[in-house]
């Protein structure tokens, strides 16, 4: 599947309507629900704002094609346009919310976070994060990317992505607390996930993509966009003319210039940070490069330490497990005869660090097998004996991305995937330290009566990053 920069390049170079329509479909939920939250649930105005955002995307496509991900830019653009649309109404809502909060405080009711109170302010809390953390939250909760996918897009390790996500949630909690809304990290994560899992009107994204593209035609510069907006969303002619007269286009350009200045400053900060890291590396003592074989062996030893962990993670109140969540320590080697058994076996293998068992239950796509074979070809004999197959190498990549503070799990459903009974999709929820719960899904494939874990081509970047880290890391011993 093509990523955002590829689609933007195809649109800019070939004026590909299919590429732009795919972009709109991919990000429509993010934009629509961000607008819907800020507009107090007004679906018609949320569509209007979404249309304006994707029209801006069509205009800014050449500049945005250099970004790794456009989710953060779309969220910012949505916030700017929605803020103009409802500035007067938002002030009245804020006064009403303040009075309601005072009444609740006086009556002794709890100010614990709930979805209704979170919706109007969640985007302001998101905007308070730095650009990289905001991108991470959006990719995780609004577009349901796994940590492996996030690490591939943002150039982070899976563990670093988890750490930054927890830190971003803590900063959002602090921002919400200033507004009188107290929450735990688990409640905030759950609320964000519920926003990301919601479904926008199914028939709007394709129509909106066509409207945004049509707005770029030279003949439509003065009249076609109002016509499209009125046709698609039945806007009143008088309201649109009044907004146009108020200089919406001029304000939008000003906002985009402001964002460009912010982006330049952020790039300068990143450049200074990189320069600082380079200078710090220059004063470190000389080190011996660590080979890929040595790195894999050390990583295997680290993962194998899970087998010697104390058996103190038993089900009970000490874990603070949520209802329905089973303690990770109760997972067993249930075999591969059924999807549910295979899922439990995968949890067991990762939790106990049994890389050999994990290697026996994965099946590799051709691209992954080729990449892993290249690793094997460059390993010394002793390392080759420890990692004899491509599956054993990829099992290391999978095991190292398993959350170190994994507390418990539960299956929430399973069903046939795609169009063949040989592919199955298991839906699950797991809980990590601090009480945070995360929803996810796992794909399984029936091969000769065993339900195996398929590893697709999207795992190749993770393998390459592991090798790059191995070659680039140093040892001072």
Image (cartoon, grey):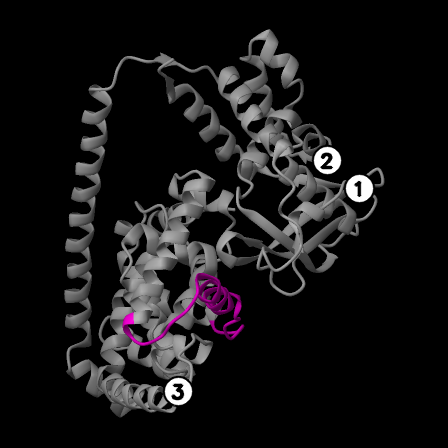
- Please tell me which residue is depicted at 16% across the width and 43% down the height of the picture: 268
Which residue in the structure is indicated by mark 2? 361
Task: Mark 3 vs mark 1: give the one in front.
Answer: 3
Reply yes or no: does residue 298 show up in magenta: no
- Report the side of 132 relative to 191 (left or right): left
Q: Which of marks 3 and 2 is nearer the N terminus?
A: 3
Kindly report the distance in space between the C-alpha atoms of the residues bearing marks 3 and 2.
55 Å
Q: Residue 387's x, y, as percent? A: 63, 19
* Alpha carbons under labels 3 and 1: distance apart: 53 Å
When the figure is inspected, residue 366 is found, relative to residue 474, above or below; the finding is below
Query: On the image, numbered disc 1 is attached to which residue?
Result: 336
Does any portion of residue 75 appear in the rendered image?
Answer: no
Indicate which disc, 3 or 1, sits on the residue closer to the N terminus: 3
Please state if 252 lies on the left or on the right of 406 as rendered.
left
Which segment is the magenta one? 178-204
- Residue 122 position (above or below residue 422): below
Q: Name the residue under label 3.
A: 108
């Amino acid at each position: 599947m093509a990523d955002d920069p590829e689609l933007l390049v195809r649109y800019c170079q070939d004026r590909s309507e299919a590429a732009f329509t795919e972009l709109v479909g991919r990000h429509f939920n993010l934009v629509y629900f961000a607008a819907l939250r800020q507009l107090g649930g007004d679906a018609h105005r949320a569509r209007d704002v979404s249309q304006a955002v994707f029209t801006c995307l069509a205009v800014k496509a050449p500049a945005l094609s250099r970004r790794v991900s456009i989710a953060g830019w779309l969220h910012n653009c949505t916030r700017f346009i929605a803020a103009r649309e409802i500035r007067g109404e938002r002030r009245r809502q804020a006064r009403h919310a303040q009075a309601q909060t005072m009444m609740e405080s006086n009556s002794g009711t709890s100010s614990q976070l709930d979805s209704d109170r979170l919706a109007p302010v969640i985007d302001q809390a998101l905007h308070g994060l730095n650009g990289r953390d905001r991108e991470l939250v959006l990719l995780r909760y609004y577009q349901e990317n796994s940590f492996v996918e996030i690490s591939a897009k943002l150039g982070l390790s899976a563990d670093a992505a988890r750490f930054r996500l927890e830190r971003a949630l803590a900063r959002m909690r602090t921002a919400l607390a200033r507004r009188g809304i107290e929450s735990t990290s688990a409640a905030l994560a759950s609320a964000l996930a519920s926003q990301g899992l919601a479904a926008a009107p199914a028939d709007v994204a394709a129509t909106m993509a066509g409207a945004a593209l049509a707005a770029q035609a030279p003949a439509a510069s003065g009249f076609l966009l109002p016509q499209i907006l009125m046709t698609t969303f039945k806007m009143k002619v008088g309201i649109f003319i009044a907004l146009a007269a108020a200089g919406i286009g001029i304000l939008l350009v000003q906002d985009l210039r402001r964002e460009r200045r912010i982006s330049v400053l952020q790039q300068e900060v990143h450049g200074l940070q990189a320069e600082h890291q380079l200078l710090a590396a220059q004063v470190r003592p000389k080190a011996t490069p660590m080979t890929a074989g040595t790195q894999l062996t050390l990583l295997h030893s680290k993962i194998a330490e899970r087998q010697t962990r104390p058996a103190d993670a038993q089900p009970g109140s000490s874990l603070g497990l949520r209802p329905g969540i089973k303690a990770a320590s109760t997972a067993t080697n249930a075999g591969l005869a059924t999807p549910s058994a295979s899922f439990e076996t995968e949890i067991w293998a990762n939790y106990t660090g049994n890389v050999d068992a994990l290697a026996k239950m994965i099946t590799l796509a051709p691209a992954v097998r080729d990449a892993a074979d290249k690793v094997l070809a460059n390993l010394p004999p002793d390392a080759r004996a420890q990692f004899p197959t491509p599956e054993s190498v990829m099992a290391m990549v999978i095991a190292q991305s398993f959350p170190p503070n994994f507390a418990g799990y539960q299956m929430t459903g399973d069903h046939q995937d795609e169009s063949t009974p040989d592919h199955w999709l298991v839906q699950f929820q797991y809980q990590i330290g601090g009480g945070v719960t995360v929803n996810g899904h796992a794909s399984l494939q029936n091969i000769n009566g065993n339900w195996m874990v398929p590893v697709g081509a999207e795992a190749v970047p993770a393998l390459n990053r592991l090798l790059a880290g191995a070659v680039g890391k140093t040892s001072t011993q």
